[in-house]
Image (cartoon, rainbow, N blue to C red):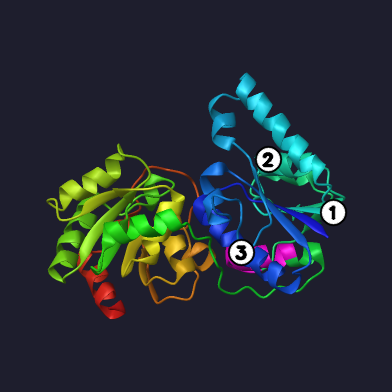
Amino acid sequence: MKILIVRVGAMGDVLHALPAVAALRRVRQEWEIDWAVDPRWAALLVDSEGKGPVVGRVHLAETKLWKKAPASPATLRSVFELRRALRGESYDLAVDMQGTLRSAVIGRMAGAGQFAGYSDPREAMAAKFYKTKLERQGRHVIEQGAALLGEACGVALETSDVELPHEEWADHWAAEVVGDRQTCLLAAGAGWAAKCWAVEKYGELAVELKAMGMDVVVNASRKDDARAAAVVAASGGVARVVVCNVAGLTALMRRMTLLVGGDSGPTHLAAALGIPLVALFGPTDPERNGPRGPGAKVVLRDPASVTSYKRTNAEDAGLAKISVGTVVDAVRSLL
């Protein structure tokens, strides 16, 4: 069997799909399993040489370029090259684990013998592209992904821990950044503002963590990350920004003593790597989207939070009620 997984992003979503694919790899080692993913998240699947513990190869779907310039020659060339690469593999089965119109189009481009997806995808139009529509099963998205992939392949899947690629350069870099110090990473950003705890509270927390003997870093994907800079300013310079790509963040996370963050990619990365964490949830439901992995964790969510997946910038009332003292207590319980 040759199988194509379609889950182009984002970081947390790729990490939530990975346990199901890793489970399939364990029980069907002879199968070829490939993945279509945005270049930004490919380092979660393969190293710089294209090798990874779960998938054979990745196909890069340059969705950021497509969105920025949908009718440009570069976008058209990118789409046609992806279609040619996918068609050239002659997949027996493609599975859309994302459920958007864009991911459905990518999966359909592969021309696989069978194309499966949820009967109730995130974007309803996506279902029109599937040959096989499967009912969503399970509460957590990881459980849903395992049920979808397992039923599509005719294999019962039990998810467990996952392995992520190593980059030697990133491991050396992270060792220089962290040294032998106990370090906490503050993942202060998120996909939309309503999922973010206040920067002032992150700054106050950084001071408390420093008093507990910990170094404090705030991750950023670029130098001009305003939110990361605001956290450092709110901490009075106690925290420091570390700019890194996904491979660097993975290596950095492996050296962390602790993570504190919201419903975001770095939080789910810490969970996958078994790093102790305190997760701060607001509008999204941790029973559906919470961090899963082998490490110790505390998930905080106030009853005032109302479940919603609308990408709003309005402050979540429940998230605003989570105090610095509550988070410090959770940190102490883990340490």
Q: Which residue is mark 1?
A: 92
- Spot occupied by residue 310 in the image (x, y as percentages of width and height): 49, 46
Which label belongs to residue 265? none
Q: Which residues are magenta?
A: 138-149
Which of the 4 quarters of the picture holds residue 61? top right
Residue 3 included in the magenta stretch of the image? no
- Circle 1 packing at 10 Å, graded few (<14), some (14-19), many (20+), is some
- Circle 3 packing at 10 Å, graded few (<14), some (14-19), many (20+), is some
Residue nearest the viewer, comparing 227 with 307:
227
Q: Which residue is mark 2?
A: 101
Whether residue 264 appears in this view of the structure is no
Q: Nearer the viewer, mark 1 or mark 3?
A: 3
- Mark 1 and mark 3: Cα distance apart in space: 22 Å
- Tell me the element at label 2: helix
- Spot occupied by residue 200 in the image (x, y as percentages of width and height): 20, 52
Residue nearest the viewer, comparing 47 with 221:
47
Which residue does the image show at 27% across and 61% down from the upper left?
A: 178
Q: Is residue 241 left or right of residue 92?
A: left
Q: Are marks 3 and 2 in contact (CB under 8 Å)?
A: no
Of marks 3 and 2, which one's residue comes earlier in the chain? 3
- Tell me the element at label 3: loop
Q: Are marks 1 and 3 in contact (CB under 8 Å)?
A: no
Which residue does the image show at 72% across and 30% down from the upper left?
A: 80
